Image: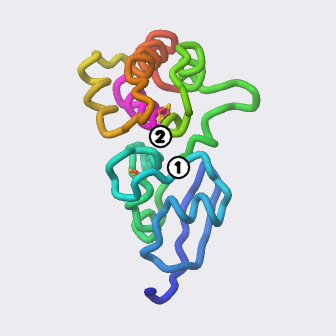
């Protein structure tokens, strides 16, 4: 284990600080230290997308992101999306399309879709597939997921709340 360091960052709009092994994965700190358990552990090898969060506007695999590498950055997890009882447009679209079976992949799918729609409010199907293709769904609910991202783009005409 490396010597501990104190890392400061913003998580879901709140200043956070942690003193820990700087190589610890962001996913572990989010889940274990801050109880932000929406992001999931799947493969641990940046291959499935279950742990996806948004770092400075870009989707990141938090399982392979050292906490030291997000020093001073802005991290968003799925817990930041809903506004009270009002779901984010992408969450709402997943619900309306029934784009979940076991649900394990869904937080990562949603965060990836949010990052996409913030960058490209009206993506083509090819752009949706390209953006989502590193997120795996073991239930193979890919048609529903594609429909949900399409619906979110259409309903929202953009990616914001
Ligand atoms: S758990 Fe991070 S990509 Fe699979
Ligand atoms: S809904 Fe089960 S893994 Fe995607």
Q: Residue at left 51%, top 34%?
A: 106
* Figure label count: 2
Instruction: Please name the predominant secondary structure of the magenta segment in the image.
Output: helix
Q: Would the CB of label 2 be found within 8 Å of ligand 1?
A: yes
Q: Residue at left 29%, top 16%?
A: 125
**Cβ atoms under marks 1 and 2 closer than 8 Å:** yes
Q: For the magenta stretch, what is the residue range?
A: 108-120
Residue 32 left/right relative to 150: right
Numbered disc 2: secondary structure:
helix
Circle 2 residue? 108
The image position of residue 53, as x and y in percent, is 47, 47
Q: Would the CB of label 1 be found within 8 Å of ligand 1?
A: yes
Residue 119 left/right relative to 14: left
The image position of residue 80, as x and y in percent, is 62, 41
Vertical comparison of 44 with 150: above or below? below
Q: Residue at left 43%, top 22%?
A: 145
Circle 1 residue? 40
Residue 17 left/right relative to 113: right
Vertical comparison of 2 with 157: above or below? below
């Amino acid at each position: 284990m490396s010597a501990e360091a104190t890392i400061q960052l913003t998580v879901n709009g709140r200043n956070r600080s942690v003193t820990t092994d700087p190589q610890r994965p962001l996913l572990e700190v989010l889940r274990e230290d801050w109880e932000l358990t929406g992001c999931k552990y799947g493969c641990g090898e940046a291959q499935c997308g279950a742990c996806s969060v948004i770092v400075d506007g870009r989707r990141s695999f938090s399982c392979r992101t050292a906490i030291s590498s997000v020093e001073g950055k802005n991290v968003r997890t799925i817990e930041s999306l809903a506004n009270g009882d009002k779901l984010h447009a992408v969450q709402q679209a997943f619900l309306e399309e029934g784009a979940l079976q076991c649900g394990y992949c869904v937080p990562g799918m949603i965060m990836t879709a949010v990052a996409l729609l913030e960058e490209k409010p009206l993506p083509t199907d090819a752009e949706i597939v390209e953006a989502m293709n590193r997120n795996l769904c073991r239930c193979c609910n890919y048609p529903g997921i594609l429909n949900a991202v399409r619906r979110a783009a259409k309903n929202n005409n953009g990616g914001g709340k």
